[in-house]
Image (cartoon, rainbow, N blue to C red):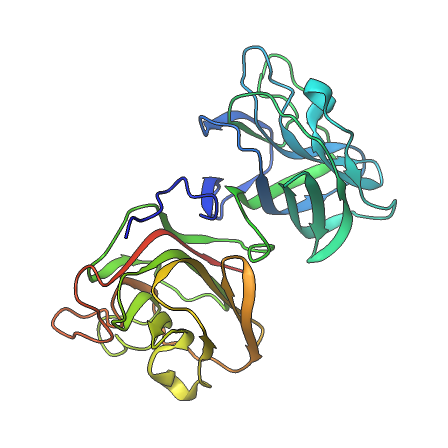
Amino acid sequence: MGRRGADSARAFHVYFSTEGDSVDYPQYSVYDAGEMPNEVMITATCEFGDGDGTLCMFGGNNYDSWQAGYMVYKAADQVWFCVQMNANGSDGPIMSESGDWNGVHDVTAQYRNGYATLWIDGEVVAEGERNWVPAEGGMVSLMSGSHNEESPKDNGPGVQWVSDLNICRNGGKRFRRFKRVIAKFDDYVDAPEKAVADAGYMGDGIIMACEAYINDGTPGTFLHYGGNNEDSWQAGYILYWYENKFLWGIQMNANGSDGPIQCEGFGPGEYTICGTYKDGLAQLWVDDELAGEQECNWCMAEGGLLSLCSGSHQEGDEKDEAPEGSIAISNVYIATQ
């Protein structure tokens, strides 16, 4: 069975992340993604103030199209999502209702399949069909509507600071809110790799996602995150498959955790899977569709170890592992929410 690569239309991919850092002044051309996607999702936490100002702009370059990317913008008493300057014949922005937006907010903006949506604090505040055509190029600027420092634009006081900014492709419906990036990589892995990263902590909300390849009927783990390698190497969040079911929960139901979500009807094949848990609500998404959800109390162990294709962080402890090639993953993304 041939695997989908990192360019899969369904694959989640992060172009740029501040990795949890905060920015409180304009930063020009901080990153170049090297391409301009036809769909995009931008998520961030920011503080809005009086007046106008840009949260970020993505797209175009810094020599002949430095004001022509996707942009999230505070315009007086509204919040906009648009293509800057309505470039290349683009339709106009989607705009929130007028109101007092001053203060700290979680903001998510998505453009996909000709439809734009803007969420603030998890609620849709503007949406609509749009034909947006950003300029070629994948430049990122923060708190500015221009990539060219010699020609600044829309870098006013309407946005006081920005943190936890993530710009990604194909956010779908499952990534409407996420914050600190714990791990992300596109590598194809088809054998256990233990304790490959240590975030050093465990957040109170989690998103775990990957491209999953089930090559035969052998049960196995995709991702295992949380716990440590001393006394809790089998007590983290786990994404697992067996007998045509995806499981999302806490390994071993550790620390008195409630049981996992179990979603049936998924035989060998290739899938995008994503598990989320926040404030007692767990959800499992398969190919951007909600496959299952439940209210539950999950208590992961302390620590932030990540293991791939294994249910244990400890070498020599083969837990929920499939033989090499039976289970594989790529496009891994783990974040707090």
Which residue is at a point 53% across and 33% down the rendered structure image? Answer: 37
Horizontally, is 242 left or right of 280 in the view?
left
The image shows residue 201 at horizontal and vertical percentages of 39, 64
Give whichever of 64, 78 is nearer the camera: 64
Percent of width and height locating residue 222:
32, 64
Quadrant occupied by the C terminus: bottom right
Camera-side residue: 129 or 51? 129
Residue 229 visible in this rendered orientation of the protein:
yes
State the image coordinates of residue 271 (x, y, percent, origin top left).
41, 58
Name the residue rendered at 73%, 35% in the picture: 130
Q: Is residue 281 visible?
A: no
Q: How many labels, in total?
A: 0
Rendered residue at 60%/15% (across/down):
65
Residue at the left extreme, as displayed: 316
15 w.r.t. 134: above or below: below
* Residue furthest out toward the bottom: 256
- Residue 324 place in picture, x, y as percent: 17, 61
In this picture, residue 181 sits left or right of residue 94: left
Q: Is residue 31 above or below residue 122?
A: above
Name the quadrant containing residue 33: top left
Q: Is residue 25 above or below residue 322?
A: above
- Residue 199 is left or right of residue 38, and the answer is left
Quarter residue 156 falls in: top right
Residue nearer the viewer, 122 or 54? 122
Q: What residue lies at 28% left-to-right and 77% top-to-bottom?
A: 234
